[in-house]
Image (spheres, rainbow, N blue to C red):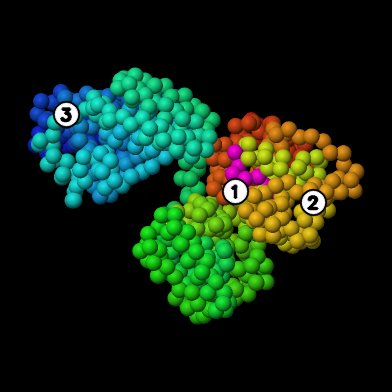
Amino acid sequence: MAEAGISPVAISRQGPVAIITIDYAPVNALSRPVRRGLVAAMHELGTDHAVSAIVISGGPRRFIAGADLREMDLPPDAPFLPDLIAAIEASPKPVIAAIDGAALGGGLEIALACDLRLGSIRSSLGLPETKLGIIPGAGGTQRLPRLVGITKAIALICEGRIVKAAEAKSLGLLDDVADGDVLEAALAAASTASKRVVSALPIPPIDISAEEAAAKAALKSAKGVPAISEAIRVILACRDGSFVEGQARERAAFLTLRESEEARSLRHLFLAEREAAKIPGLDDVIARAYARCGVIGAGTMGAGIAVSMADAGLYVTVVERDDESATAGLARIRAVYQRQLESGRLTEAAMNERLARFTLTTDWATLAHVDLVIEAAFEVMAVKQDIFRRLDAVAAPGAILATNTSYLDIDAMADVTSRPQDVIGLHFFAPANVMKLLEIVRPARIAPDVLATGVALARKLGKQPVVAGVCDGFIGNRIYAVYRRHAEYLIAEGASPEQIDSALEAYGFAMGVFAVSDMSGLDIGWAMRKRRAATRPAGERYIPIADVLCEAGRFGRKTGAGWYAYDVAGKKSPDPFVAGVIEEYRRDHQIRPRDFTVEEIQRRILAAMVNEGAKVLSEGIAYRASDIDLAFVNGYGFPRLKGGPMWAADRIGLDAILAEVEAAHGVGGEGSEPAPLLVELARSGKTFTAWRKD
């Protein structure tokens, strides 16, 4: 990044061609110093008679990666991006964009204002604003259709898709792709370049039916994001041919969307993703090698983990207990790829290439050659400890020993090895090759480079890393257990499973809590409750309804019945058996059921989550509130448009959350008491978002 007082935008000259170079680490975001420097450069060069053409470059492997999102919640500060783009387009000299990296969002809008766009093979282009709840606000919705047509513009903008150089050229986004140095290619092109103002170009032939089909498809996959319908509206405004009117519609929509709760939530999550990788004490720590990996167990979870690794280009040795299990494990792995092949997401050549990265065996000695091994065995401490003893004996010095446990004490697993510093928790979520969250659990004696390796592996696998401390359930499952318990309290008091699930889905959850339990298997929670029974607080209210369902052999989808009944096609429906069990519990405990509104259910569940989240924060299990938000958005179906539970609580007001928690405490007893941190923040008027543990 440019030093204080030094502009991040510099001008150099090569004969009659001026080169404007942006140097604003790490990605040349369009912060105010960059905008100001670019405007000044355009004004200076526009009146310089010695200059015949201008090249805009972001330097090696870069261009402009988009807006600085941190500025969006600050007061407006000139120069504004539309003014900068107008200055580029109004230049009397041809302007060439030399793109050697990401041209995204406002960066692509700047490129679209240029008269010629050249890219290297490393370049990537896109307008991903709708993923942040907004639309392009500096002409992107109006210039893009003039290059690629309305139909393709709707798809590109509404999907927020980023395209590589070859596709960008085929679409018409790039005029050419340079074989070598893109700056040299731009300088060579400058000698013959002429003005070609994109905003003045006619719209390619309009195909009403294709455009309407693209709009319908975009709306279908919008998932409630208001920006999608607004993007379609302003793109279709191109049909009247007036760029000025279209740009005015675009700018008005952009400014309105930017202030929406949805956009604020999505910006919060975007910045939270950056923060999550900032782990105290790891600034200068180098990760260990992990090119060769091992997985213990090829069940559903183990197979998914192995596929996730192979998809990332890693070689995977999968160890099973016998030949029959190894054969079944390979069949599971093949089935994952076969489904991708049949859906067209994978070619046969790519499938075979990935399958070649697997070795399935029953020989533990093969693990002597791996850099990192993950066990994915049964959630039983004795089983896990036995595996770690065997791994300690066979794994090479310096190899990382990982567990995929969802709840168990990883320190107790590390204790049975001679190298506790090499032990880490890598908690994947099912299906492991699909779900984005990877909870990285740090035992007490973990070496810094082992923790750094966990974060690096998550990025390699395309996962969202969230680092957690050791406790029962870590961040996600600890909070989830509490919110599920309070959902059961609501059932005891008068709500039905389907009412609670419907309320949660209306809030934006992908699935309700009881439908999720049926999908995961009620036996998993049953085993956890039995394990915790000896340490359950005496004053905690316990609802045994789920236990009764399990005792009746109702474990969810896999048995055809759980909280719901399931037909042969897997469709769920309310079950009279469950209603009878609930009614019997209420009768035995002399509970007169009451009605709950949708809003009451939503408030109670959110409050329970937030209260336990406050305890997780104060205990240091999570580094920051936004890590909890990332965990629940990426692993538990919490709606992205709400920003995560802690962010949502801040937006509602912590005083209102505290009042709901106090009411929940009266129902749940010990363990449901208000967290001291929540009380402190609510009384001081502060937020979880701004809080940092000392």
- Tell me the residue at 71%/43% (across/down): 498
Please, what is the dominant secondary structure of the magenta stretch?
A: loop
Badge 2 amino acid: Phe
Can residue 645 be seen at all in this image of the molecule?
Answer: no
Dividing the picture into quadrants, the one containing residue 147 is top left
Between label 1 and label 2, give the one nearer the viewer. Answer: 2
Q: Quadrant of the C terminus?
A: top right
Q: Is residue 36 left or right of residue 513?
A: left
Crowding near the residue tagged with mark 3, few <14, some 14–19, many ≥20 C-alpha atoms within 10 Å: some
From which residue to which does the magenta span run? 508-514
Q: Nearer the viewer, residue 578 or 26?
A: 578
Can residue 621 be seen at all in this image of the molecule?
Answer: yes
Q: Nearer the viewer, residue 658 or 187?
A: 187
Q: Label 3 vs label 1: CA separation?
A: 52 Å
Q: Is residue 283 left or right of residue 650?
A: left
Badge 1 amino acid: Tyr
Q: Which residue is mark 2?
A: 577
Where is residue 566 shown, x and y percent of the image?
68, 53
Where is residue 574 shown, x and y percent of the image?
73, 46
Residue 513 among magenta residues? yes
Q: Which residue is mark 3?
A: 195
Q: Is residue 89 left or right of residue 137?
A: left
Q: Which residue is mark 1?
A: 636
